[in-house]
Amino acid sequence: MQLHMQHRIHSVPSRPSAMPDRRGTPIGGAMDGRPMQAFNGMSGSGLPPLEWRKSARSGPQGNCVEFGRLPGTDEVAVRNSRHPSGPVLLHPQQEIADLVQALKAGDFDQLL
């Protein structure tokens, strides 16, 4: 999902051929000192340790969306807290900021 300042939402097709390639974002944390490559859909266990954050309104059941900033980049990782080693989605920080603004403006209220 890509968001723009006007809160317009553009869906990313789910067909594999339409998805971005897996070259990824270089991040620190590889055991041998070389930068790792982070990419959409990679396992959360493949990321370096992140400070994951979730809403204070999240319950103890663990069914939350968590966000963590990738060190040395402007990328934010998003994961399902029930599956911390499962796939993560990566978004530029500005896209996350646009999402938060759209949520505050009620742009997604029809989904509730």
Image: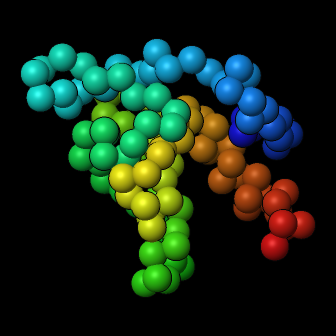
Position in image of residue 83 (x %, y %): 43, 61
Q: Determine the residue positioned at 74% across, 30% down.
A: 15
Location of residue 112 with respect to 104 vertically, above or below: below
- Measured as percent of width and height from the top left, residue 49 is found at 24, 46
* Image point (72%, 39%), residue name: 1
Q: Nearer the viewer, residue 51 or 84?
A: 84
Q: Is residue 69 visible?
A: no
78 in relation to 22, above or below: below
Q: Residue 2 appears in which quarter of the rendering?
A: top right
Front in this rendered view, residue 24 or 2: 24
Q: Is residue 58 above or below residue 97?
A: below
Q: Reply above or below: 28 against 48.
A: above
- The image quadrant of residue 104 is bottom right
Which residue: 48% across, 53% down?
Answer: 79
Residue 97 falls in image quadrant = top right
Residue at the spot x=12%, y=20% of the render? 33
Tell me if I can see residue 50 in this picture: yes
